[in-house]
Structures are given as C-alpha cells and as structure tokens.
Image (cartoon, coloured by chain):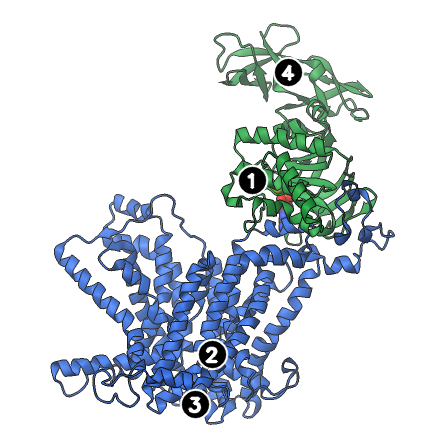
Amino acid sequence: MIDVTLESVSKRFARAGDTAAVDDVDITIAAGEFFTLLGPSGCGKTTTLRMVAGFYFPTSGRIRFGAEDVTRRPPNKRDTGMVFQNYALFPHMSVAQNVAYGLKIRKVGRADARRRVEEALGQVHLAGYGGRRIDQLSGGQQQRVALARALVIRPRTLLLDEPLSNLDAKLREETRTEIRRIQKESGTTAIYVTHDQAEAMAMSDRIAVMESGRVQQIGAPREIYHRPATAFVARFIGRSNVLSLPVTGGTDDSVTVGLPDGGETVVAAPVGHGLRAGETALVSVRPEHIGLTSTTEPGALPGRVTELEFTGMATNLIVDVAGESVQVAAIDVPAGLAVGDQVGLRLTRERMWVVRP
Amino acid sequence: MGGATVTAAPTAATVPPVTGEPTPSGRDRRPRLADRLSGGASSRWFPYVLVFPLALILFGYVVQPMFATFAESVGVDGVANYTEFLSGEGVARSSLLTSLLISAASVLLCGIVGVAMAFLLKRFQFPGRRLIEAIILVPAALPPLIGAISFQLLYSETGILPRGLQQLFGTENPVLPFTGIAGVLVVHTFTMYPFFYLAASAALAGMDPSVEEAAYNLGAGRVRVWRTVLLPMLTPALVSASLLVFMTSLASYTAPLLFGVDRTMTMQIYINRTNGDLPMASAYASVLAVVSILFLLGMRWYEGRRSYRSQSKGVAAHRREITNPFGKWAALAASILATVVLLAPVGTIALVAFSADGSWTTEVIPSAYTWQNFVTIFSDPKAFQPILNSLQMSLLATVGCVVVGVLIAYAVRRLDFRGRALLDVAVMLAWALPGTVVAINLISAFSTGNAFSFGQVLIGTFWIMPLAYFVRFLPLVFRSSSATLAQIDPSLEEAARNLGASWWRAFGTVTLRLMLPGVAAGALLAFVNGVGEFVASVLIYTSQTAPISVEINNRMYSFEIGTAAAYGMLQVVLIFVVMVISGRLQNGRSASREAARWSA
Ligand SMILES: Nc1ncnc2c1ncn2[C@@H]1O[C@H](COP(=O)(O)OP(=O)(O)O)[C@@H](O)[C@H]1O
Ligand SMILES: [Mg+2]
C-alpha cells in the first residue's frame, strides 16, 4: 500500500475540442485509505481513474505513487489492481487461470502461485471454483473473480470503476460490504469510482465529489453531508434546498441572512466565507431539517403546499414560499393536509449551512 | 513495477521499482526509452511504431503500383491512350460501355433473383426449404475459372442443357443456348446473386415483423405494404448489394473470357497485355481502377450515412406455410428444380472429371468414364507441378496476409492515430481493385527493380505470384480479423496490461488468442482463394509458376476437358473442406461470413 497524489491533473481529449474531461484536479490519497470519486455520469471519474491506472496520460499535471512520479509510466509498470465495470475476465481462461495471470507475469513460482490463487479465491468466498469456466459463473461470482484477480498480485493500489453497477440491488449491498472488508484486511489503498452516493457514503473513508471534470469537495462522508462546500454538492448528496438569501451581517464563521417573511437568522458558514452585508448567500437546508407547523407560529415561514407525496416513512412536500419552491420531508403531517393548504415552515437553524455557488 | 524484478513478498510493492526511480525534474516529462518501447496503446507515439511498417507495405504493394500503372499508361504516348475512351468508334469506348452495360444488367438480374430467393426462403415454409438454404451459396463458392467453366459446360451452345433439349425435341440446333453477353450474364447471375440474397435476408431477419403488421393493421393492402414499408426498409441492403455486384461484374474476367466477349475492360487489359501493349493495358487498368475506387468510396459513404437499422425484439418473423394444394405441388416442383440448378455446376465438374479426355464430342453428356484424370494429375510430375505451385504460393501469401491483416485490423480498430481512415481505405483499395488491375499494377511497378522489391525485378520470378495473392486476399483476413476484434471488449486487453503484461504479451495472450477463430477463418478463406486464383495469375505466371487455374485453362484449350475438371474438383473439394472447418470454428463463423461477403 502506498499513498497516491494527483497534482493539478488535467486531461483534454484530442477529439473533444477544448473542454477538459478532467480539469486541474488535486487529490492526495493516504496509504490504506478507501477513497471514492463520486459524481454524476460524465463528470470525469473514469478518466481520472484511468490516468491513475496509466491507460491515459494527463495533458498536464503529475501523478505520484509515494515519492515516485508515475505520470507517464505505462500501465503494466504501475502495479495497480483494477476491477473493471464489466469485469473484463478473460473468457478463454478458467477462474484460476484468470486469477493467476498477474502472478505468472510476475514470475511467481507454481506452488506459490497456486497457494495464493486459492487464498485469493477463499477471500472472495469462491474456494473450489478455480476450475470453472467464466461463463459458468453468475454476475456476482464474476465480480468476485475480478476482485480476486486484482487483489492476488498485492497491488500498490486497488482501482475499482463502478464495480457494482452490473449487480442487482440486494447483491450490490452485500458486495459493497465485502469489498470494504477485504480492502481493510489487505490494507490496500483503494480508489473507488461510483455515481451512487449511498454506496460512496457507506464505503468510503473520504470522498471527492466531482462535477464537469472539477473536484467540488473532498471530505469524509459526514463532512460532505453536513458541510457541503457547494450548492452542487448539497443537492447531489442527499437532497437539499439551496435558498438565496440576502446577507445582513456576519462573523468569520457565520452570516446573518434575511428570511422571506422579513425575519433574520444566523447561519453557520465556512471560515473565511468572505460574504458581506448586501451580498446574497446560498444557504443549504435539507428537507428533513424543516418542520411543519401552523402559519401562526412566530418565526415560521408561511407557505402554500403545491405537491404532496406520501412515501410511508415520511411525507414529501413542496411548499411555495414567496415564489421559491422548498422541499420538505415531514414525519408528522397534520391529518387532512392537502395541496393548496397554507402551512408554516420551521427551519432548524443549526442545520443550515452556507455553501458556495 | 519493474516487471521481472517483482517478488512475491507484499513489501516488495513499496520498494521503488528499478525502472521507476524519480527522474530529475525538468526531464521527467519524457518517458525513458524502455518505457517507451513497452509503452503500449496508451503512449502517444506507440501507434505509429506499429502502423508505419503496415502503411509502408500497403503503400509499396497496393498504392504505389497503381501510380506506376498510371505512369506507364501516359509514359510513351501521353494522354493518347485515354482519348480513345472518348472518341466515337474505338474499341476502348465500346469496351467501357459494354462493361458498364453488363454490370448494370447483372445488378438487375442478381437483384431479382437474390431478393426473390430471400423472400421465399425467409418468409415461406415449404418442402425442401432447408436443403435449398443449405446449398444456396454453392454455385458462388466455386473458384472463378472453374465456376465459369461449369456454366459453359452446362448452358453454352455445346452445353449439356441446350444439347439435351435438342435431343429431347429432336430439333436441328441446340435449344436455348447462352452465348456471348447472355452467357456472361448467366454466370454473373448465378455467382453474384448471393450479394443480394445475403443482404436482403439479413435485412429481413433484422426487420421487426410488427412494423409490417402495424401497416396491415392500419389498413394498408399487400402492395402498399411492399411499396411503403418493406422496400424502404430493404433499401440500404439493396443499395449496398447493388454496388457490390456492380463492382464485381466490372472486375469479372473469366466469364467474358469463356463466352468470348472481347470488348470488356478486363478482356482488353488481357488482350493488350498479351499483345505487348503495356501502356494501353495500363490505360484500361487505370480507368477500371478509378471506376472501382469511385464505387468503393460511394459504398463507404453510403454505409456511413445509413442511419436506421431496425432491431427486432421478441417475436421472430414467422414463416407462412403454403397451404393451398396447387401451391404446395408447385412449391415442391420448384424446390426440386432449384436444388438441381444449384447443384448442377458442381455436379457437372464432378461428372466431367471422370470422363476420358477427348471422349466427349457431340453427346449430351460424356460417354466414357475413367479414373485416369486423377491418376495423371497426381502421378505425372509435370501435371502435379501446378498443384504444388498453387499450394506453395497460396500458403506464402496467406502467412503474409495473416501477419499484416491482423495487425492492420488491430491498428484500425484499437489504436488512435492520424491517418487511421487512410489505412482502412488502403486495405479496402486492395479489395476493390479487380484482379486484372492488381496484376497490371504489379507488372508496372516491378518490371524494374524498386525499393519495395529490394531492387529486384520481380516480373518473371516466382515471387510476383504470392505477392499478387497477398494483395488480393489481404482484405479477407483483415475483414474477418476486424469483425472478430469488434466482438472482443477492449477492457480485456487493458485488464492484462493492468496486471503487468507488456503490450506484446497482452496482445498475444489475450487479444490475439481470442481473435484466433476469426483469423483462422479468414486465413483459410485467403488460402482457398489463392488456390483458386486465376484472374491475376494468368497475366503474370511463367511456365514454372503456373498455378492450378492456369493449368485448367491450358488443358481446356487443348481439349483435355476431363483433366481440367479433375484439377477443378481438387479446388472444389478443398473449398468444401474449408467451409466445413470454418463452420466448426467457434465464433469464427460470423467472421468468415463477414469475410465471405467481401470475397468473390
Ligand atoms: N476516449 C475519450 N475520448 C473523448 N472523450 C472522452 C473519452 N473518454 C471520456 N471522454 C469524455 O470525457 C468526459 C468524462 O468522461 P468519463 O471520465 O468517462 O466520465 P464518468 O466516468 O464520470 O462517467 C465525458 O464528457 C466523456 O464524453
Ligand atoms: Mg465512468
């Protein structure tokens, strides 16, 4: 295991005009860490991962494994173990031959290789499957063979590109726990790519949220959820209302904003936010941090229900507050509440947070 | 990691690898030489290392000879040779027109036969349907010369059918003989309708039957459905097939040769060449090349822009059972007739192969039979030499085709480099050029030494023959390799690279290994085509290098028809063996079918 550093890495594809698929990305991944690249489809996750694997070379910037600069090193000299989205198992080899492929290249002795293959297959609960043909395995089993093949070479980093996207929902949850367990056991640095935020949250030590080739925020799952850096992150991780509110004052780590009903409130903000009175702050507040009350309660924002959807655990509402649509997830809803009714919204002040555009 | 130096110990991973010590900053943007050499598909200039020799080969043996031919055609008389194509009464002009006319008529005839066959076999259920489907490509599978000979033996003035009818009706002359252009058209129809048949049946198979049903449901009658739904959906397939048939007819040489139609482009090339007027032969070859290239480009353009390909999900098109009793009997009679017609050419060659030379004069079929022909061609060293020549030259060419064809397919499909489309076009150029033109090109280029022949004169040597076969059949291996490659996920090779394999190793152990069935199918196809080759051979062979087909032609001239047919049987048997093997090659089947579309 080893730490991986991306320094100002950009990638422009020759055919894709001027837009960068990956734009000035700086990431440092600690040895042994489970690090996830998260973002919507097309945001540059795969491109970033493939630069780490050596399948693309960055247009500019540097990639280091530990102290070594591997920026332009070919993929076969990098000693990474990659799990491909479609598994990329060799169809003309048995399970054991697939797993042994990397060992053979590393000239590991036969007895030793056989032992390690058995061990790796055991690790992914496929002991005894070595003689099977690839097409005799289910999707989940193939996925685990791919994982075993990548792990058996004891790579410096494990690279996984949406490895669970071809599995059904239940298997996906089981497998993500497995991957996490195996990664912890082997202590390998892992870089994981997904567009599924729940998966990212559940598995990662840290997450980099990407959008349009840029890193929006890097942080632990809780930090990203509770302290999103940008409006995009706030909306992409879970759901969130991002309200544009006028700034009336503030300190180093908070701002005072005006509310649509004429009141004011103090909202926590990142240190050095730089917002001044008169400017507009973007304030994120999650639907589950908004309570429903009567319109008469002091400090409540008055609004009108425009959509209402019962999901079992909670009721999702969209409430029109002075022309702005606010999402609300309420556990307790007054009996008989219907579209068109007037309600009061109580914002949980300590859960509100100022984000960058 | 530094490849071989990796040990099994997990801690080894943290030891800086031998090849990877941090390079001094400022210089580290340039990869080390060792890394560059194994840089693989991801390094920016690697593709050029692979592509350069391939491009050189294509330039040296396909493109440059074409220019040499053009230079030859204007070298002595300037443009005089070309003005003949424009002036009113000349042979050149009438040959060009005849060639175009024959090609247009061939398209029409093949279109009618091929599309009708596709509809009957894909849409109707009747007795004998499976048998006909199985043998439908047999006439077209024959090598060009032996195929044309079989039609001559069957349908010409001295052919079995006209003479048979003459005897049957007791008339004075053979009944319904095909001569001249009509004979050429018979050969073309029988050997080229598969282009339409295959294209139309693929289009029919890919057509969602519910589209047609929707039209009926909306109240359209049968004619209207045909006009407004079926034909428009078949159009792309029909256009492609038309272009293919037109090109193939234009390139056809054996049919005009056997039916004595001298005024065609290919015959004029041959006649001028044998009369020693190479500049005029070159002018014909250049004109033919230009027309062929135009068709090739037209075909690529058309296939590139054709957008809709209806894909069928669920219900397969059902076949209509023919139920009315009269229809049933008619269908049975028609399928028996079709079976006989389809098998007649091979049957004729087989029959004649056992006839004693000189025994067949005015009878409907030969009167005396013997094994002697086969004994002769195998035991007489002089008679065996052509067989040896063909096998040897064809094998050499096939090896070349495999090495170059596989690498070009890989480069075109998998690598990103400037001029990729050009490489693709250059291979297809070799395919588009008629065999006669390929031969003239090689004659023009290599009748003096040049860089690509290492300064040697190749004309009159053994080497010109395998070279011609290589140029002609490279596209077959390229096509089938490329079709297989399209089915192999590129991430397999990446997985191998990720696990530490060098580019060569990943290519060898994964990509090439998985391509093998397709490559083998293409190689077999190239090999049998080489063994059957006549069109180019006849222009460049010497008495020592005469291949089987040239020997067949010579024997026909000296009326040793039985011996000629015995040689032909060898070619036919070889073809059927190869067809069976290719069919067995798991997943090579689709590749060989793809390649077969492009052969003939
Ligand atoms: N080989 C390529 N050539 C050109 N553009 C590419 C290539 N690979 C990816 N892109 C473009 O780069 C952007 C990022 O793609 P990718 O990294 O695959 O996104 P993600 O994995 O996050 O879905 C996309 O706009 C994509 O179209
Ligand atoms: Mg991706």
Residue B21 place in picture, x, y as percent: 84, 50
Looking at the rendered structure, the kind of residue marked 3 is Ile
Q: Nearer the viewer, mark 2 or mark 1?
A: 1
Rendered view: A180 above or below B102: above
Where is mark 3, residue-wise? B271
Residue position for label 2: B435
N-term mark: 1 or 4:
1
Chain A appears in which tint?
green
The one of B87 and B505 positioned closer to us in this rendering: B505
Front-lying residue, B504 or A204: B504
SS class, disc 4: helix
Label at residue A129: 1
Mark 3 lies on a secondary structure that is helix
Q: Where is residue A234 in the image (x, y as percent from the top left)?
A: 66, 27
Q: How crowded is mark 1: few (under 14 residues within 10 Å), some or many (20 or more)?
A: some
- Contact (CB < 8 A) between labels 2 and 3? no
Q: How far apart are marks 4 and 2 (CA)?
A: 79 Å
Instruction: Give residue A289's mark.
Output: 4
Task: In the rendered view, tell whether residue B523 sits above or below residue B158.
Answer: above
The location of residue B481, given as percent across then percent down, is 53, 62
